Amino acid sequence: MSETIRAHEKAVLEEWLDAQVSGRGMRSELLSRQELHDQSRSFLDALASAMATGVDVHSPSFIPVRQMLEELSAARARQGYTPTETATFVFSMKQPLFALIRRVFKDDPAALAESAWEVTRLLDSLGLFTMEVYQKGREQVIIRQQEEMLELSTPVITLWKGILALPMIGTLDSSRTQVVMETLLQRIVETGAPLAIIDITGVPTVDTLTAQHLLKTVAAARLMGADCIISGIRPQIAQTIVHLGVDLGDVITKASLADAFAVALKRLGLGVQRTRPEQNAQASAPPKRSGQAEEA
Amino acid sequence: MATLHSEDQAIETSEDVVHVRQRVRARAVEIGLSLVDQTKLVTAASELARNALEHGGGGIARIEVVNDGHRRGIRLTVEDRGPGIADIQLALKDGYSSRGGLGLGLGGAKRLANEFDVQSRPGEGTTVTIARWR
Amino acid sequence: MERIPILKMGRYLLVTIQVDMHDRLALTLQDDLTERIVRDAAKAVLIDISALEMVDSFIGRTIANIAAMSSVLDAETVVVGMQPAVAITLVELGLPLKGVRTALSVEHGMAVLKARLLSDDERHGDATQ
């Protein structure tokens, strides 16, 4: 198959270019015919070489082909091509290749059928590969955005010397929970704070995996010589936890962050004390008597 | 799946177990695994290497840097020449040990890895393969 | 023969593990510590593992054994400085390290030990005071 393509390379290239230009993939405002010609020729060359060893796209001889497709797919994604338009680069090769096979094997129906099948499998795999690369590129963008959001949305706060608080907001998916937990444990080491309050008031729902991650975090903190209190458990979450059969063991849970703070203080042997009679908390001086205000 | 690098480490002494850990750590750092993932992999490697030494009478560890087309990973294959495992499911259960003491090795290594495979037959030694991806 | 050094500070024994321990070294430490507890009439052992980047099931069990043996010899043990990655891995491994008291740092560990030793003295009445 490889030699066949080599022998008719020029013709195949021309037919392929025509198919691309007239098909869905052509964005003439983004790519000139000459550039497309160069891209296609390099690719066809690499493909013909790779096919000398077979049609397994995962084999090492196809690495140059895959690399080329990766670069092409990434470049086109950046330029604004849709994934289908990019995949058409590969799929539009079917027409010229089938035409070639029909010409070369016209007297051997068995060989024709087999070659056609080989080419179909090959181009389908490569076409799917371009889709996957596109997907991966998009995923990378999402992951990076998630990481940035993560850093912004879950700060670890020092409530008091020795007491950290981690207010979590938004839905907790497995990977986010993991990253946040690792950050918390790291902060525990950095600050030497033996108590951390994980507040989940801002978390609408919790699934089994997330609950397990929370429990694992508490277990890890304990192994390190610290402890965690979980606060802000809404009624729905309490129900979910029981419903899912999650065993909280001896992890202390409190309805509010304030309650959890009180427990933490007590554990450290600290307390809050009244130092003057109850007054309003405003910082400004009390108003002068009305008579004085009118004096010149 | 492409193998970018491969190295073997014999497991004949308890120092060799340390060598396996160190080599796995070095490769894991090279491919940029996070600290937690590195630690999980190195710990799993230690469990498997020790098993090979204690229960398998010695063996060999192969540490490979692999690429599946999308991401890089570390694959560790530990092969021993021991008596083999008669009941793999039982061996994977925590607390099981043919010699007494907490048998966390095999099950533990499985939990710490992304991929896990064990091939063993009584009288034919045991080969455990684990992998951790970036 | 290499050994992990054990420092004596008053009634405390301090061990800092800074090397990647092979099994024999860990067992030697276990033996050395139990011997020193008796020889020095130590009341407390502080094991600093802040430099350990990995704790597997064998090292974990050894630490648990050391704590148990010390307890039998009437000494308290605290393990300090466990790294987050190690803690996370131990949880995943399923090694609970029951019976081992831990603290975030040497200071925290000393505070824990002092508190316990004080309450012990109060309870039992220390004949050597």
Image (cartoon, helix red, strand yellow):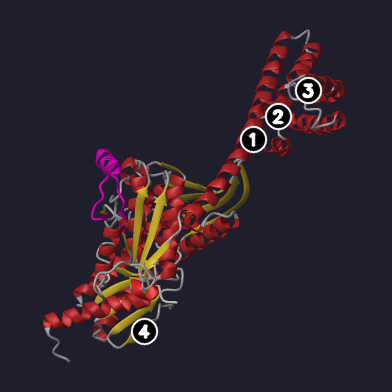
Indicate whether residue A241 is drawn in magenta: yes
The amino acid sitting under disc 3 is: Gln
The chain holding disc 3 is A
Question: Relative to C112, is B68 on the left or the right?
Answer: right
Residue A118, x across and y down, in percent: 68, 21
What element does badge 2 sit on? helix
Q: Mark 2 touching mark 1, by CB under 8 A? A: yes
Q: Secondary structure at mark 4?
A: strand
- What's the CA distance linking mark 4 and mark 3? 77 Å
Q: Which residue is mark 1?
A: A134
**Residue A86, numbered label:** 2
Instruction: Give the residue at x 71% y 36%.
Output: A61
Mark 4 or 3, closer to the camera: 3
Q: Is residue B8 left or right of residue A159?
A: right
Mark 1 in CB contact with mark 4 (< 8 angstroms): no
SS state under label 1:
helix
What's the magenta region? A229-253
Report whether mark 3 lies on the same chain as mark 2. yes
Q: Residue shown at 30%/78% (left/top)?
A: C111
Residue under the image location 71 percent in, 17 percent down: A115
- Left or right, residue B75 beside residue C77: right
Work out how far the residue at label 3 is from the one at label 2, CA to CA, in angstroms: 10 Å
Mark 4 — on which chain does it sit? C
Q: Is residue B81 above or below residue A9?
A: below
Q: Chain of mark 2?
A: A
**Viewer-proximal residue among A19 and A293:** A293
From the image, state whether disc 1 or disc 4 is nearer to you. Answer: 1
Label 1 in the same subunit as label 4: no
Evaluate if marks 3 and 2 touch, with contact meaning CB atoms under 8 Å apart.
no
Measured in 3D between alpha carbons, the distance from the residue under mark 2 to the one under mark 4, in whole angstroms, is: 68 Å
Work out whether mark 2 precedes mark 1 in sequence or the reverse, and give the earlier one.
2
